Amino acid sequence: MANPIEMYFWPTPNCWKVSIALEEMGLPYDVKLVNIYGGAQKDATNTAINPNAKVPSIVDPDGPDGRPITVFESGAILLYLARKTGKFYGTTERQRTEVDKWLMWQMGNLGPMAGQVHHFVKYAPYFDPPVVNEYSQKRYVTETRRLYKVLDQQLKGRDFVCGDYSIADMAIWPWASLWEGQLVDISELPNMEKWLARCQARDGVVKGRALHADLRRDRGSAEVQKHMFNKI
Ligand SMILES: N[C@@H](CCC(=O)N[C@@H](CS)C(=O)NCC(=O)O)C(=O)O
């Protein structure tokens, strides 16, 4: 029996990628909660494995050569787990390159843009005093809507982003599942809507998404403002 992987986690889209992957791949894991609303991401325990002071991260006691390994950045974690298990990452160089493209698309485009929508639409207006920046809201909502059109086009004629279910779906679904709060009109995205349902029907997605869901807050607050955005 493999030793459990330590998953440094808080119920957020980037962390759901990892909880979903661990569930889908059938890997045992222990959850280490990092309360980002309370500032724990900046504690020495977390920054020792995540120098960027964010979540998620993992520690795999059974890393390469049998020695422990730490991994941060959700995309790097997905790639590591896919290589470790040989699952959800195709089998040929052509298939893997396809998965890489869409994984990088999520990491470099959808995640950062939708993240800014969350900031300017769901968090900042609830700060004390409220911050409502219409230009920023419009810019990031417009770009996020454009990205979902790109995704919808890719999903035309495909069940999943790269054909078979892969780590690209695991990376994209957590963000895309929150389309409503990102002010996206799903009726314009029929392929994406069907794909969301296909992903949501998977046991691994249901379990990974449900993990510590009670701790999640969808809105900004004075606490979130202090611990996540006090650098501003
Ligand atoms: N590119 C990073 C982004 C990580 C990230 O922004 N994590 C958020 C939660 S989804 C976080 O830790 N926020 C706390 C903070 O910004 O202080 C990844 O994909 O792992």
Image: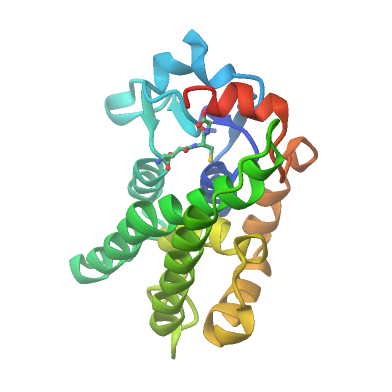
Residue 220, picture quadrant? top right
Residue 2 lies, in percent from the top left, at 51, 32
Q: Position of residue 137 (x, y in %)?
A: 53, 57
In the rendered view of the protein, which quadrant contains the N terminus?
top right
Residue reaching furthest bottom? 157
Which residue is at a point 60% across and 61% down the rendered structure image? 182
Q: Is residue 51 left or right of residue 209?
A: left
Task: Identify which residue, 33 or 221, lies in the foreground.
Answer: 221
Q: Is residue 164 visible?
A: no
Here the colouring is: rainbow
> For this rendering, which residue is in front, 202 or 100?
100
Q: Position of residue 119 (x, y in %)?
A: 56, 45
Q: In the image, what residue occupies the spot 61% across and 75% down?
A: 198
What residue lies at 36% left-to-right and 58% top-to-bottom? 109
Left of 227 or right of it: where is 155? Answer: left
**Above-or-below relation of 159 to 68:** below
